[in-house]
Amino acid sequence: MLIALCSVKGSPGVTTLAVALAVKWPQTESTRRLVAEVDPSGGDLAMRFGLPASPGLVSLAAAARRTRDPAVAWEHTQTLPSGASVLVAPPGGAHARAALSTLATAPDGPLLPAVAQEPGVVVLADCGRVDPGSPAEAIARRADALVLVTGTQGDDLAHTAVRLGELARWTPRPGLLLAGDGYPTADVERELGIPAIGRIPHDPAAAATLTGHRPPPARRRRTGGGLAHHAATLARTLAGPTAPAASRSATTPAGVPGVPAQQVRQPGGTVSTPPGQGPHPPRLMPTPPQVSDPHRNGHQPSTAGKEPPA
């Protein structure tokens, strides 16, 4: 299984989420988990976990010129404390983009999707910010599920709305994941016209622990609603069994539970939108939701616009 994780603006925690999903993935004893840094702006995990820069994305790109055997990818991975494998990218964007371009433009297609087709393998591809023309697009387009992570402030959502329709056509199963405080989930869903598959909280302590950093100074501990809990829930959703065969057409590929079936890739590679299942046309976030307190000017979400604590 190949799961592409990406954003369209800023840093809403895509890399941290990829690691968290690998840590919390169900049935880890029978699943080979690979976190692949395919962000063309460069990687962070080698520095965060104190790993060498090689083997990694650059050495794999060199090896891929000599062989197209998917098994070669594992020879260029390292191991995280959780037991998951990681394909680290160099911190420099120029080297990362060059290596990624080599892998993405191979005549018979990118190598990582072939790795993800192996039984018992899940590849969590950290595509970073998918600007137009990103070499990570070739990998994301072959994903079984694409998770678009977005912040929930007005500027985040405006950028997301512009790209939402395009990204929804990249894979058969796109999903919108909200991150942090800001507009309430119901307001975001209404304005963007599609449901969200979840919302991950701003949880610096858990994020630091999951990505090899020292946790920040003591804070009030989250009780059951932190990043780890939400990552575990999302991992179970993505890894869950497909719908029973009797409930879908024989020509329709199985969906990923919890990820809206907005697009269906038919045999031959064409993509269609089943009647009544496509997303509404995305709209730019208008003026912020009205609040009852006349002292608030409405230009930025206040605590009234935050998600209730779990």
Image (spheres, rainbow, N blue to C red):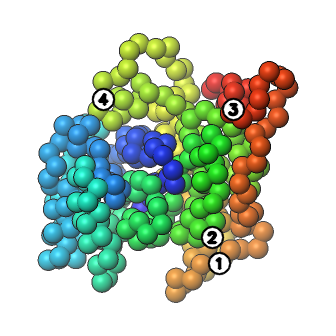
Q: Residue at 80% across / 21% down in the picture?
A: 295
Identity, as a three-letter code, of the amino acid under mark 1? Ser
Verify CB contact (< 8 Å) between mark 3 and mark 2: no
Say which of 18 and 11 sits in front. Answer: 11
Q: Residue at 77% across / 43% down in the picture?
A: 287
Kindly report the distance in space between the C-alpha atoms of the residues bearing marks 3 and 4.
30 Å
Q: Secondary structure at mark 3?
A: loop
Kindly report the distance in space between the C-alpha atoms of the residues bearing marks 4 and 1.
43 Å
**Quadrant location, the N terminus:** bottom left
Q: Secondary structure at mark 2?
A: loop
Verify CB contact (< 8 Å) between mark 4 and mark 1: no
Q: Which mark is residue 301?
A: 3
Q: Earlier in the sequence, mark 4 or mark 1?
A: 4
Q: Position of residue 94 (x, y in %)?
A: 26, 60
Identity, as a three-letter code, of the amino acid under mark 3? Pro
Q: Earlier in the sequence, mark 3 or mark 1?
A: 1
- Total marks shown come to 4
Verify CB contact (< 8 Å) between mark 3 and mark 1: no
Could you tell whether 292 is left or right of 212 in the image? right
Q: Secondary structure at mark 1?
A: strand
Residue that label 4 marks? 213
Q: Residue at 56% across / 65% down in the picture?
A: 167
Closer to the eye: label 3 or 4: 3
Kindly report the distance in space between the C-alpha atoms of the residues bearing marks 2 and 1.
6 Å
Say which of 209 and 164 sits in front. Answer: 164
Identity, as a three-letter code, of the amino acid under mark 4? His
Kindly report the distance in space between the C-alpha atoms of the residues bearing marks 3 and 2.
32 Å
Q: Which mark is residue 263?
A: 2
Kindly report the distance in space between the C-alpha atoms of the residues bearing marks 2 and 4.
38 Å
